[in-house]
Image (tube, grey):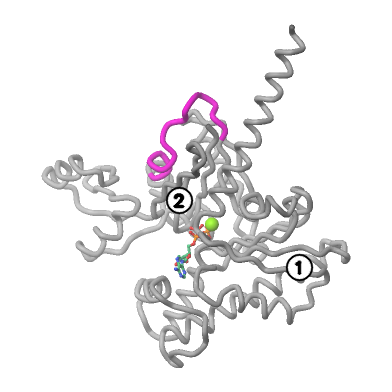
Amino acid sequence: MATGLDVGTMNILSADQEGTDTVFVQQRNSFVEIEYSDMAEQMLSRSDVLHIRKGDKVYVVGDDALNFANIFNKETRRPMQHGILSSDEQSAIPMMKLIIEQVVGEPDYPGERLYFSSPADPIDSDLSTLYHQKTLESFLDDMGYDAEPINEGMAVIYSELADRSFTGLGISFGAGMTNVCLSYYAVPVMKFSVARGGDWVDEQAAQATGTPVDKVTSIKEEDFALDFETDVGGVEGALSIYYENLLEYVIDNIVAEVDEEDIEEGLDVPVVVTGGTASPDGFKELFQDHLEESDIPFSISDVMHVNEPLYSVARGGLVAARSDEEEDEADRQEAETSEE
Ligand SMILES: Nc1ncnc2c1ncn2[C@@H]1O[C@H](COP(=O)(O)OP(=O)(O)OP(=O)(O)O)[C@@H](O)[C@H]1O
Ligand SMILES: [Mg+2]
């Protein structure tokens, strides 16, 4: 069966179809380095903690990294930054390989179709996504998959706009980036990313309030809402300010790109906002308010929020992969009938 894979700066997720259910497997895209000892190695090998040894270090990878970091009082590290493989992190590739192997598992058969998400080149930085994309593609191919990249914004359209003829604006607010794609009948008309997302909000709010970034992230993920009623001067107040700034920044960039691409003004399309950063209550409403105030040159029929924002991209990859497999199957059957 086909597979979808969301390769994100903070989370790596796979989506598979089992009967009528879509099954997701998720790991945190992070690791922590601890000193090697025979005892530690033995204990880890008996557990199901994901880890690898390199020389006199052991790396604990994925969801467990955070627990180990807390116990050993260390910082977790990230293989990716701003949506792509981090150039500051030499261990990035083996760490991600381990996480991806755990999340997607072996292919069900050689050449199983897999779509993995890849960001569009950011318009506000020099980062190029090519190396990242080709590296992932080659190690997924080595695992035995027939792997293809899918633009992250397009994956949102596949996942959430099936009943709207895959027409609309899909936006994935992630950790390292925000990805935007405008699709018209499943054809991408415009796609871009900005190198800002949840990490940027956390860093800014941390700096403004003198709070450690990890602490800000947990406050944000726990029960933060964009209601603008709380906490002037506190972390939640700062989070609200930078959240609003991120939304304005994304909308301004959408307006600028739409102008540049000369998009048909008669369009009337839905917008979907998703990704982990779109989780807080009030996000959709705030986005909608700012969009209404903007000079976007076409009309927006509605702004949609999804129930499980962390799953959209992986699900979109699965939709694309299944559609390819169905097409291959139809071709095969047609070839068989014409042989008869
Ligand atoms: N409940 C929540 N409330 C607020 N923010 C959240 C919540 N859950 C997750 N996040 C934030 O969402 C971001 C992760 O989202 P997501 O998994 O969509 O990103 P990613 O795909 O890993 O990153 P990218 O697409 O940028 O590479 C992080 O910034 C995280 O702190
Ligand atoms: Mg993402």
Q: Where is residue 166 shown, x and y percent of the image?
A: 72, 51
Q: Quadrant of the C terminus?
A: top right
Residue 228 falls left or right of residue 288: left
Q: Amino acid at mark 2?
A: Ile
Neighbour tally class for label 1: few under 14, some 14-19, many 20 plus, Cα within 10 Å: few
Q: Is residue 107 magenta?
A: yes
Task: Please report the residue visible at 28 percent of the width from the left and 45 percent of the height from the top.
Answer: 51
Q: Nearer the viewer, residue 225 or 5?
A: 225
Residue 164 magenta-drawn?
A: no
- Name the residue rendered at 35%, 77% in the picture: 212
Q: Is residue 56 left or right of residue 7?
A: left
Mark linked to residue 74:
none
What range is drawn magenta here?
99-113
- Choose between 89 and 186: the one closer to the eye: 186
Residue at the disc numbered 2: 12
Residue 197 location, x and y as percent? 54, 68
Q: Secondary structure at mark 1?
A: strand
Q: Position of residue 68 (x, y in %)?
A: 24, 58
**Residue 260 can be seen, yes or no:** yes
Q: Residue furthest front?
A: 20
Picture quadrant of residue 196:
bottom right
Residue corresponding to mark 1: 301
On the rendered structure, is 317 left or right of 140?
right
Element on which disc 2 rests: strand
Of 209 and 129, nearer the camera is: 209
Q: Nearer the viewer, mark 1 or mark 2?
A: 1
- Determine the CA span between mark 1 and mark 2: 32 Å
Image quarter for residue 193? bottom right
Residue 268 picture quarter: bottom right
Is the C-beta of the residue carrying label 2 under 8 Å from the nearest atom of ligand 1?
A: yes
